[in-house]
Amino acid sequence: MKLAKDSLIYVAGHRGLAGSAIWRQLEKQGFTNLIGKTSSELDLTNRDAVFAFFAETKPHAVIDAAAKVGGIHANNTYPADFLSQNLQIQVNIMDAANSVGVEHLLFLGSSCIYPKFAEQPIREDSLLTGALEATNDAYAIAKIAGIMQVQASRRQYGRHWISAMPTNLYGPGDNFHPDNSHVLPALTRRIHEAKVSNQPEVIIWGSGTPRREFLHVDDLASALVFLLENYDSPETINVGVGEDVSIRELAELVASVVGYTGKLTQDTSKPDGTPRKLLDVSRLTSLGWKAQIGLEEGIRETYEWYLQHLDSLRSK
């Protein structure tokens, strides 16, 4: 289903890492009727406000990239917040979308929905086949509920709603907070600061052996617009690159890009998280889409963005 270039498309979370990339991609592809609201303009946990917004705008399509997100530390420290706020956001958006008959909606999930010890690479049908990783189970449960609401809306209302599960994301606009960021921006900030202050070593959380897959947000955005027009199935679909690296290899790559020559030391008292999390992206590639941005190229671009925004990031 090809969307008309003047279709009214609501991008929820359009200021976030994923949402801003989706907005850029839609504009790049010539879509001219986009709508987004900041959290101060529209509180997505406020059900009445969300229903009023949908009643007023009646979007043709919705991309839900709005979520409360964070790394291991944040998920482990604030599980009630991650569960409650994400459930509220997605339930309000989807209920409001159903109330005005939105036919096309894409719900953006997370690869943490899959079992901790899922067979690698992780296929879409491994969902709900085992226990979740304990450090982010609350966030995962919220995202699983979102997938189920997409499927339920398809069954009950005949909607063309889909859900996509991206692997670990990174890129310009990422969160570089010293405590609440994901592994790649956290490493980038720590290694950069060590270089600037001539620190002889940087401490890396965990053993360094867990393996992770990293997808540039611009590749994600390209995939999501592609899926919105070319995928129509109740089953969620993975979005990734099909390759992974160890956390140690990632740290060494970041150090190389940053130009840090000190020692990288593993703190094995800190949690590792899931041993490996590589997505099977064969369903997506069979449709004709494949990631284009290599990891080193993407890290270099992200580091350049970080350097350009250092002044605003120092206060965060």
Image: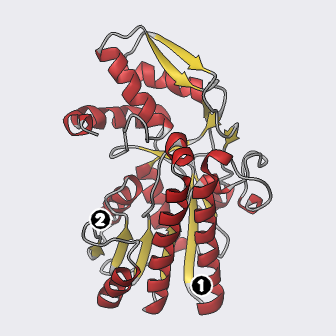
Q: Position of residue 211 (x, y in %)?
A: 64, 34
Mark 1 crowdedness (10 Å alpha carbons): few <14, some 14-19, many ≥20: some
Mark 2 crowdedness (10 Å alpha carbons): few <14, some 14-19, many ≥20: some
Residue type, label 1: Ser
The answer to whether residue 1 of the structure is visible from this angle is: no
In the visual, does 105 lie left or right of 233? left
| Image quarter of residue 151 | bottom right
Residue type, label 2: Glu
Along the line of sight, the residue nearer the viewer: 254 or 294: 254
- For the point 57% across and 57% down, which residue is it? 139
The answer to whether residue 19 of the structure is visible from this angle is: yes
**Figure label count:** 2
Alpha carbon distance from label 2 to label 1: 28 Å
What residue does disc 1 label?
153
Name the disc covering residue 27, or none.
2
Secondary structure under the numbered disc 2 in the rendered image:
helix
- For the point 56% across and 86% down, which residue is it? 159
Between disc 2 and disc 1, whose residue precedes? 2
